[in-house]
Amino acid sequence: MPTAIVTGGARGLGRVYCLALAGAGFDVVVADLLDTGDAVDEIEAAGGRAIGCRTDISSAADTEALAAAAAGEFGTIDVLINNAAFYSQIVRGPFHEVSQAEWDKTFEVNVRGTWLVCCAVYPYMKEQGSGKIINIASTTCFKGTVGFPHYVTSKTAIIGLTRCLAAELGPDGITVNTVSPDLIPNPSLRPSDEVSDQFVVAERPLKRTQVPEDMVGTILYLAGRGSDFVTGQNIVVNGGAFCQ
């Protein structure tokens, strides 16, 4: 079976990705700062195979341990989904009032963390001669959303990193792509999402709230053989709110 690592896999979007990948026949490595036990149990209860790894993606030691655990348990690392991000704790406000600490934390997790996990899995994928890296960005990169300059800039950086890695890792048989969702409300983490979603829905042709399951088809496509000749791309999943 192919193996997929999902960062931020214990809850939310990441957990949905983990369950979908397991259902598609992948062995899954659930990586998260949070406890991964429930996600692993849910996968195993459905007949899948999974392990959990407590991982701080901003730590090189943690990301290297994650890659070693995945390869040690399942033999290969075929897919990496860089989903973990610093978002729910961000305080929305004018750009000049963002604290330096919050700015730095956002980049430490979203940009450095994504880069570090890519660095950690690369030797395994290179040795295999194949691999798929899927980085999660955001449609905020294209809208210039007010109040989140550090988050928006960090996600834009991920698209740039994706393009660089696609060019560099292609000769090793590794594809690197980005998926950009629109707002997927999570009122339990950010109560303001519920209000923001009303405005977002009004802007899109498909007049409903975007849900985590809307991302699954694109993720499985990029993780599967059907996308073997697709790399360096950013796929927007936003209900048609804008076109590229």
Image (cartoon, grey):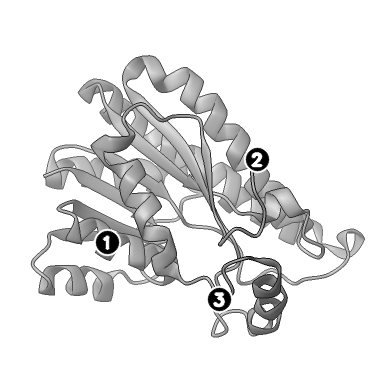
At 35% from the left and 55% from the top, the residue drawn is 217
Q: Quadrant of residue 34?
A: bottom left
Q: Nearer the viewer, residue 200 or 57?
A: 200
Q: Quadrant of residue 90?
A: bottom right
At 47% from the left and 26% from the top, the residue drawn is 166
| Residue for badge 2 | 157
Res. 65 in view: no
Q: Quadrant of residue 98?
A: bottom right
Tell me which numbered mark, 1 or 2, is placed earlier along the sequence.
1
Mark drawn on residue 20: 1
Quarter of the image with the N terminus in it: top left
Amino acid type at mark 2: Ala
Q: Is residue 154 left or right of residue 168?
A: right
Q: CA distance from mark 1 to mark 3?
A: 22 Å
Q: Is residue 175 left or right of residue 86?
A: left
Looking at this view, name the residue that lies furthest to the left: 47
Quarter of the image with the C terminus in it: top right
Q: Nearer the viewer, residue 92 or 57?
A: 92
